[in-house]
């Protein structure tokens, strides 16, 4: 009879431990799913921000190009003199090497 009580107590303890392990396993799965969702949201946000910065940079580059083109069309002699000056300076710098 004592053996039966010990065996029953042992089996009850094992079943309780098994249940606790399963609960822990489910908890870890839930934590992993939450971490995955958080990482996916952060990645999506980073992609959106990078896309916005890229688009803004593209717009600014196009605007700069239009501004330079307008300046060249309105003041062609000035543009030629600036280009010649820059070319002279670059040539002088490269010849010294």
Image (cartoon, rainbow, N blue to C red):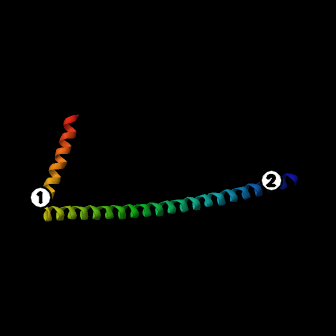
Q: Secondary structure at mark 2?
A: helix
User: On the image, numbered disc 2 is attached to which residue?
Assistant: 7
**Is 12 placed left or right of 51 in the picture?**
right
- Pick the quarter of the image with the N terminus: bottom right
The tally of labels here is: 2
Question: Residue 41: x percent and y percent?
Answer: 47, 64
Task: Between label 2 and label 1, give the one nearer the viewer.
Answer: 1
Please report the residue visible at 60 percent of the width from the left and 58 percent of the height from the top.
Answer: 28
Question: Residue 65: x percent and y percent?
Answer: 22, 61
Q: Earlier in the sequence, mark 2 or mark 1?
A: 2
**Is 92 placed left or right of 20 in the picture?**
left
**Is 9 placed left or right of 91 in the picture?**
right
Please report the residue visible at 81 percent of the width from the left and 56 percent of the height from the top.
Answer: 9
**Is 67 placed left or right of 12 in the picture?**
left
Camera-side residue: 90 or 17?
90
Camera-side residue: 68 or 2?
68
Camera-side residue: 42 or 62?
62
| Residue 60 lies in quadrant | bottom left
Please report the residue visible at 26 percent of the width from the left and 61 percent of the height from the top.
Answer: 61
Q: Secondary structure at mark 1?
A: helix
């Amino acid at each position: 009879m004592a053996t039966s009580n010990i065996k029953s107590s042992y089996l009850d303890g094992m079943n309780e431990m098994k249940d606790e392990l399963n609960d822990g396993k489910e908890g870890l799965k839930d934590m992993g799913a939450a971490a995955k969702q958080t990482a996916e949201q952060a990645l999506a946000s980073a992609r959106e921000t990078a896309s916005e910065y890229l688009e803004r940079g593209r717009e600014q580059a196009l605007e700069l190009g239009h501004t330079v083109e307008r300046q060249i069309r309105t003041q062609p002699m000035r543009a030629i003199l600036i280009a010649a000056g820059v070319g002279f300076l670059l040539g002088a710098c490269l010849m010294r090497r």
